Image: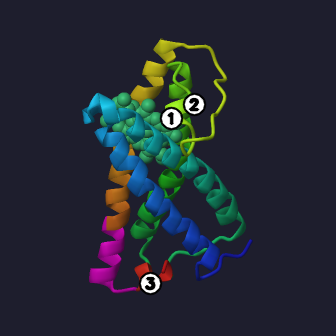
Amino acid sequence: MEACMAYTPTAKWFHWITVCLIAIALPTGLVIQHIKESDKMAFYAIHESAGLTLLIVASLRLWYRVRHPVALEPSLPAPMRVTATVVHHSLYAALIVQPLLGFFATNAFGFPMQGATAYFGFIDLPKFMPTMEGLGNVLIWIHRWLGWIIGALLVAHIGGVIFHQAIRRDGTLIRMV
Ligand code: HEM
């Protein structure tokens, strides 16, 4: 399939909806353990609902992206091309794996998205595995580390955008708005 030079409006919507959902899922995940007990459930509900929605959005986005390839800015030197591609592919992968880890971990802990932590507050999702606390601990450990890796990828991604906008002035940010 031949790559286009510009993002379609659908691709832009996918991008900015992803930004909004990460802006909810990442900070709520980071603060949950410091929240007082009485407010914790609300944070779990918001974090898990935003995270699971990210799984749906990221999967649809990846499916759409494969069907609508877009070329990187043509004047980009090879090392920047490789870096941008690695960061983009890693973000796609992480945004699909991370919610799955969280979702399976909550089930393994015997704490599925039901009741106070139902999807969007009212959609109870099934508990689909027996409680296995050991597995839950492993999954949530990986989830924590991947959370930090996603943070680092976002720093690289946003750093790249600032570099393109302020130093190379090649209009990279404008391509996505
Ligand atoms: C892309 C989506 C997601 C991101 C970026 C994300 C990120 C994070 C981060 C950064 C943490 C904090 C780790 C730490 O303590 O250092 C966390 C914790 C957690 N996340 Fe997620 N998460 C996502 C999706 C989900 C989903 C879908 C679920 C469950 C359905 C989930 C369940 C949890 C749980 C149970 C914790 C542990 C909170 C605690 O310490 O008690 N996450 N997440």
Please say if 38 is above or below 90.
above
Q: Look at the image and tell me whether residue 101 can be seen.
A: no
Q: How many marks on residues?
A: 3
Mark 3 is surrounded, within 10 Å at the Cα level, by few (under 14), some (14 to 19) or many (20 or more) other residues, namely: few
User: Is the CB of the residue bearing disc 1 within 8 angstroms of ligand 1?
Assistant: yes
Magenta portion: prevailing SS class = helix
In screen coordinates, is 38 left or right of 86?
left
Mark sitting on residue 117? 1
Q: Look at the image and tell me whether residue 48 can be seen.
A: yes
- In contact (CB < 8 Å): disc 2 and disc 1: yes
Image coloring type: rainbow
**Residue on which the image places disc 3:** 174
Q: CA distance from mark 3 to mark 1?
A: 38 Å
**Residue on which the image places disc 2:** 114
- In contact (CB < 8 Å): disc 3 and disc 1: no
The residue positioned 47% from the left and 56% from the top of the image is 21
Q: Which residues are magenta?
A: 159-170
Q: Position of residue 165 (x, y in %)?
A: 33, 81
